[in-house]
Amino acid sequence: MAGLFNNLLVLFFVFQNICLGFRSSLSVFKRYKDTTRSFSSECLGSDQPVISLGLSDFALDIRMPGVTPKQSDTYLCMSVPLPMDDEAYVVDFKPHASMDTVHHMLLFGCNEPSSTENYWDCDEGTCKDKSNILYAWARNAPPTRLPEGVGFRVGGETGSRFFVLQVHYGDISAFRDKHKDCSGVTLHLTHQKQPLIAGMYLMMSVNTVIPPGEKAVDADIACHYKRFPMHLFAYRVHTHRLGKVVSGYRVRNGQWTLIGRQSPQLPQAFYPVERPVDVSYDDTLAARCVFSGEGRTTETHIGGTANDEMCNFYIMYYMEAKHAVSYMTCTQNANPELFRNIPQEANVPIQIMSDMLKMTHGHHEETKDSDKSSLLQQAKKEEEEILEQNFHIEEAVEWPGLDLKLGQVAGLALDAENNLVIFHRGDHVWDENSFDNTFVYQQRGLGPIEQNTILVLHPSNAKLLHSLGKSLFYLPHGLSIDKNGNYWVTDVALHQVFKLGPDKKEPLLTLGVALQPGSDKSHFCQPTDVAVDPNTGSIYVSDGYCNSRIIQFSPNGLYVMQWGEETSLGRAKPGQFHIPHSLALIPDFSQLCVADRENGQIQCFRLETGEFVREIKHKSFGRELFAVSYVPGLLFAVNGMPYPGEAEPVQGFVMNFSTGEIIDTFIPLRKRFEMPHDVVASEDKTVFVGDVHARAVWKFASTEKMEHRSVKKAGIEVQEIKESGTVVEGRLKNNPESTDPVKKQEKQHLVQQHTSTGISFVLITTLLIIPVAVLLAILLFMRWRKTTVYGGDEEHKLDSSSGRILGRVRGKGSGGLNLGNFFASHKSYSRKGFDRVSTEGSDQEKDEDEGTDSEEECSAPPTPPAPSSS
């Protein structure tokens, strides 16, 4: 009986452990993310190094056991045994380190570490037997995720039984407070057999010498490959401070194929190989590091300290399990003549911002961060000043632009003069017939849009200043304007991105292939938005409805890098998108924020590296967030219509950029939001929202600003109304209005004309009032005389008569002069198009063709939830 009880007890604990193992790996890694801190006194990995992630998966935490290096350029090692003898596979690496304290980390696999101590000086060695590099980290590199079905094999009969972590502490000034460091890495392992085995190929120069003052020095490495085929999926570059660019290639039959190219001064992550590259027997692998000896007074050699240099090109690959080799190296240049034909790009340094360069160095050589610090402090100060203001965003109901006749409004932007620029679809619509299931546009027979698709309007009176874009586009989508006034737009039907000059009819630059969807470096698939960095000129494209990525191009349109992937099941992980729909560039903080539409959130990334910074997500966003815009200190956004049964209304949001906190919301007073598609804001907190279904653009402003205008600028408001009246009067005399911007001289003439008209009006009114006053005085005198002679029988009648006269005079005065109504009463005046003067009565006006049946943006049905296109 006792034996039965013991068996049941054992089964109970096993069952309990299995149940606990069903926690999702995402929740486990989220817990790591939430609890990991840069303060190294908390050694999170020491208490629970192994965490179950289910029946077959587990996490292994490998951390330094609370160390304090005594001198710069210290290399410390520690080991962790594989917690079981069975074969397992490493499928994910998550680093826990900061470049403020750690120069770089390497993770080795072996069977016998060099020491059995808690940690030791790596000068004693890492492993007594052969060691394999499994992972490398430096410069705040993000986590590395292996492809599906690929893993590093450990344990069992052939795999490593120990992990050895090597940490290089370059600059120990961060340890002045004597704190203890617990940097390391968390591994995600699985017992599920992986069909493809990962390995590391290290290309390393061992004899390069960099003369002092030399502007460009090449370190070349090349080896012939003599093994079974391998498939390359990630690469990493590594040098110290003198490295400018590192490039790696496969050479086959004289043809050079790029594996990867990167600046070693950026975070030294494993970057994905953009196009599939396989390496076969007798191919050549070649790499070049370009150094500069400028600023040095002595020769620089390859070595392990921060004052030395390194030239490393790491390649992650996978092979079929039966042929797998876990680690290979190349340390020679087998064919120096080969490099005569190396592509020119390998010799061109990758330019990065000087501030970023200062931030990315973790060596003990001193760097001056005062410029970067002052810039960030200034940005922070401006943000605090903005947020101290008490304001509320409300619709500017006097703005006449709501009644413009537009097509589907896809994009909005503000130019340097804060004029509103609208990108609309004219007589084209995006509906269920627009694309086939391979995203190829099906309505090419309609031809391009015959109307001007880009309209430039005055922000106060919606007057058309300029227009362009006729016969260029099929389905406009995203719009932005660079610091030189060029228009950058996307077309989801053409699958292209265009740069247009303000006065040019033809594009200055075109990215993508017309009408051809794709997912490589030269194709897009329904790109949604584009943004241009004002500091570097770099181009960022969100791509898009059928790709889930952000792509960076050089100012000339050359591919640089990309990041992002499709959202997996459950909550989206950082860098996963479900329609990256809108971009907001944050130059003050070198960030790019993305409206991740179907995930209902904003994700922000570092411009230079694509590294994830943070997400902003609120319940009030609902399931969809369509667009985001930035002004110093503030983010503006608009969401989508709620799904059936959900309560979150469609509205606009104002958020504190630093905290992500919602500080205000806004909705229109006239009409209503149907599918707000884009939002743009100016620094004075004027906001415009374009709606693709309502075919309308609303203007919003802060109540603080509107009150200020009504109190202090009332005269200007009246003057603007008079100007509108004058323009309409001119049209009634058959003088056609020019669509070009009014010249300065003409504006001065109009102002003088309006001023004189205002004076004339006041003079005429005064002259009319004087006779009335005299007449009243005479009537009162006569009444007095009559009362004196005849008595008071008529007093009431006269008083009431006088009251009616005075009442009519007061009524005209109190009602004010409305030139809009005056001109509207003219028999030939029309309210259509851009001629509207008064907004009175617009609450009841309806566009005859406002119905949305023919303007379908493929809104997602409630079951199952699916993204809508727009």
Image (tube, rainbow, N blue to C red):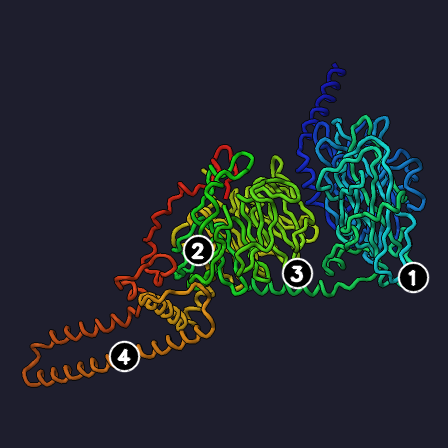
Q: Nearer the viewer, mark 3 or mark 2?
A: 3
Looking at marks 4 and 2 on the same chain, the residue that comes earlier in the sequence is marked by 2
Quadrant into which the N terminus falls: top right
Specify few, some or many for label 2: CA neighbours under 10 Å numbering under 14, 14-19, or 20 or more: many
Disc 4 versus disc 3: distance between alpha carbons?
A: 57 Å
Looking at marks 1 and 3 on the same chain, the residue that comes earlier in the sequence is marked by 1
Question: Observer-nearest residue: 368 or 399?
Answer: 399
Quick check: 442 left or right of 187?
left
Q: Which residue is mark 1?
A: 298
Q: Amino acid at mark 1?
A: Thr
Looking at marks 4 and 3 on the same chain, the residue that comes earlier in the sequence is marked by 3
Disc 4 versus disc 2: distance between alpha carbons?
A: 39 Å
The circle on residue 698 is: 2
Q: Is residue 291 above or below residue 9?
A: below
Q: Amino acid at mark 2?
A: Trp
Disc 1 versus disc 3: distance between alpha carbons?
A: 35 Å
Q: Which residue is mark 4?
A: 764
Give SS at disc 1.
Answer: loop
Disc 3 versus disc 2: distance between alpha carbons?
A: 31 Å
Q: Which residue is mark 3?
A: 535
Q: Amino acid at mark 4?
A: Ile
The x, y position of residue 451, in whole percent, is 44, 52
Disc 1 versus disc 2: distance between alpha carbons?
A: 65 Å
The x, y position of residue 615, in whole percent, is 62, 48
Q: Is residue 646 visible?
A: no
Specify few, some or many for label 3: CA neighbours under 10 Å numbering under 14, 14-19, or 20 or more: few
Residue visible at 50% across and 46% down in the picture:
474
Give SS at disc 3.
Answer: loop
